[in-house]
Image: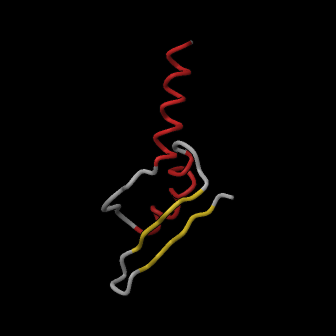
């Protein structure tokens, strides 16, 4: 199941976490939220993001 979790700290800092997405689809899914919240201060990519990118790169190299 794909979900986007938003946590707002008492100081007003927001954390956006995507779950169930593969590759860069998480960025596309959360783009509207990030745009509404303002400038991003940090980004941590999940293993799922990197694993899918590796597979995509291998497929491109074979073509």
Q: Quadrant of the C terminus?
A: top right
Residue at the limit of the structure toward the left, as seen here: 41
Query: Image check: 42 left or right of 30?
Result: left
Of residues 33 and 58, the one drawn nearer to the viewer in this rendering: 58
Residue at the limit of the structure toward the top, as seen here: 63
Q: In the displayed structure, would residue 38 be above or below residue 49?
A: below
Whole-percent x, y for residue 27 in the image: 50, 51
- When asked about the image quadrant of residue 5, the answer is bottom right
Whole-percent x, y for residue 49 in the image: 49, 44
Q: In the displayed structure, would residue 53 be above or below residue 48?
A: above
Whole-percent x, y for residue 36 in the image: 47, 67
Of residues 24 and 47, the one drawn nearer to the viewer in this rendering: 47
Q: Residue at x 50, y 56 (%)?
A: 31
Of residues 3 and 39, the one drawn nearer to the viewer in this rendering: 3
Residue at the limit of the structure toward the bottom, as seen here: 10
How many numbered circles are shown? 0
Q: Residue at x 47, y 66 (%)?
A: 16
Whole-percent x, y for residue 50 in the image: 46, 40
Q: Quadrant of the N terminus?
A: bottom right
Q: Residue at x 57, y 54 (%)?
A: 29
Query: Image check: 33 left or right of 39?
Result: right
């Amino acid at each position: 199941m794909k979900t986007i979790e938003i946590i707002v700290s008492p100081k007003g800092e927001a954390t956006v976490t995507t779950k169930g997405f593969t590759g860069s689809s998480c960025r596309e899914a959360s783009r509207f939220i990030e745009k509404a919240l303002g400038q991003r201060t940090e980004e941590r990519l999940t293993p799922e993001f990197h694993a899918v990118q590796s597979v995509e790169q291998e497929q491109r190299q074979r073509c």
